[in-house]
Structure formats: structure tokens, C-alpha cells
Amino acid sequence: MLLLACVAAMVLGQSPAVTSDARGVIRLRVKVGDTKARGLQRKRFFLIKGSLSDNQALVQSIEQHGFVSRDCYYRGVGASEALINWLKQSECESVYCREVEAKDIEGPEAVPEFQQAALLGEKEFGSRELGRKWLTVNLKDELRSGYYHQQQRDLQTLLKQAEALSKAPVQSVMTDTNGTAFFTDLEPGVYMISNLLPTEVGSNAIIWNCSIELKPDDLATEKSYLLANLGNKDPRDKLVKCRSTSEKPLPACPAASK
């Protein structure tokens, strides 16, 4: 009996441990364009419980949701062409995206809104350098964070619908400088990956809505998914797990206020 018990213990000790609380990881890589294109950086994606058919009402809401582009918003609040170009250089959605440099407040590349805010800061702090570093506090609210808040309001509407349909929390991630992001702590099941609001890339607005399945066997490894747009010409197309479901030209905007 003692020998049998020892053998049983050895067999059990060599068996892989399977636990009900095992979790999986999805590695997301987002790329738009040809093989030389960089990954899509600083873009947010969401993971929603259930398939596309389970979330069909949400998909329809995403496709039909009104969309105001970054340029249209800033032109609508009277931003200068210089500020719009500054945002466009790094695909920024707000002035917090990158540092305002000295060349942005003086010289031929100066942004009028930054110049004015920096001067106010210089008077307040007694230093031109501090005025530059803290100039965002002297920008109008609609220029400082208005577009972000508008995007957040639209997102919250869609997120509430997503959680009501799926009866589960929605995960979100933002891609890094290489266009990579990770969804972690996932249970096996079917999920929908979406950006919920159109992503601006060049002159187009792109939407992704795709079903993926995380199987129990996938929990032991990192599951990779490549997202690409319809115009992607990468010869490794067989690796693309999710293609954009909509790609439309950005709406025309009125000329910037002078």
C-alpha cells in the first residue's frame, strides 16, 4: 500500500497543474499601411465579452455614431492653423500630447495660442521658461481639453451599452510607440475587439470590430492578434486576424477662424 501511494504521488506530481482560475493574455498589434508602416501608436482599443452577433446592437451604434474629427473640432472652436498643424505633427488629440518647445512660442513656427499663454505665464511666474512650461493653464478650456472631454462623453455612451449587452466589464488598452498593447487576466471565451470610436489615420477614419476566441489551451501562452486596415498591402496578410470593418474619408471642415 505504501508503494502504491508513493507511485500515485509521483504521477500526480508529474501531471500539469490545471486550475479553474487560470487566465490568458492577448497581445494586440495594430498596423495601418504597407510593410514599412509603423505600428499605430497611442490609440485605444477595447475588449468586450461576446461575439459580434452577441453585440450586434453595439456594432450598429458604433457604425452609426456621429463623428467629429480632431481638425473639425479645433477649427470649430477657433484654433489657429498653426495649432492644428502642431497637433497633426504627432497625431495629438490634445496639447498634453507632447512638450511645447521654445520654437513653438517664438520664431516662424510659433503657435499664436501658445505665445499668448506663455506671455501670461511669464507675467504670473516671473520667468519666461516657467511661462512656457506651464502655458497650458492659461489656455482656454476648449483648446486645452475640450476635444478629450467630447471624446470621453461619446465613449461613455458606447461603453455603457457594451457593458449592458455583455453583462461584463469592458477592458481597454492603449497602444505603445510600436502599436502594441496587451489585454491581460482573461478567461477563456469569445470576445469582440473594437476601437468604439473611429481612429483617424491620415485622411481616413477607421473602425475595427472583430470577434476573437480565447480557448483553454491558449491560457498557457500569449495569444497574438494583428489588426490591419482594408488598404494594407502586407504580403503577410495571412497573419492578419482582424481587418477594419469601415474606412471612410474624414468629413470636410470649415476654414479655421481668423
Image (cartoon, rainbow, N blue to C red):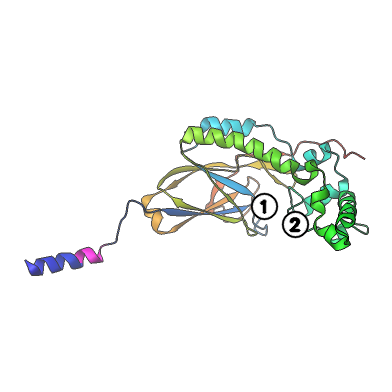
Q: Position of residue 169 (x, y in %)?
A: 49, 41
Q: At 8% across and 68% down in the image, what residue appears? A: 2
> Which quarter of the figure has residue 80?
top right
Q: Nearer the viewer, mark 1 or mark 2?
A: 2
Q: Position of residue 57 (x, y in %)?
A: 53, 29
Distance (Cα) linking label 1 and label 2: 24 Å
Q: Nearer the viewer, residue 79 or 50?
A: 79
Q: Nearer the viewer, residue 196 or 201?
A: 196
SS at circle 2? loop
Q: Position of residue 182 (x, y in %)?
A: 53, 55
Left or right: 187 as drawn, with respect to 122: left
N-term mark: 1 or 2: 1
Marks 2 and 1: in contact by CB < 8 Å?
A: no
Q: At 59% across and 35% down in the image, what residue appears? A: 158
Predominant SS of the magenta segment = helix
Left or right: 191 as drawn, with respect to 216: right
Q: Position of residue 66 (x, y in %)?
A: 68, 32
* Residue 226 visible to the viewer: yes
- Number of residues whose C-alpha sits closer than 10 Å to that of mark 2, classed few (under 14), some (14–19) or many (20 or more): few
Q: Which residue is mark 2?
A: 98
Q: At 66% across and 42% down in the image, what residue appears? A: 206
Q: At 44% across and 46% down in the image, what residue appears? A: 213
Q: Which residues are magenta?
A: 11-15
Q: How many marks?
A: 2
Q: Which residue is mark 1?
A: 33
- Number of residues whose C-alpha sits closer than 10 Å to that of mark 1, classed few (under 14), some (14–19) or many (20 or more): some
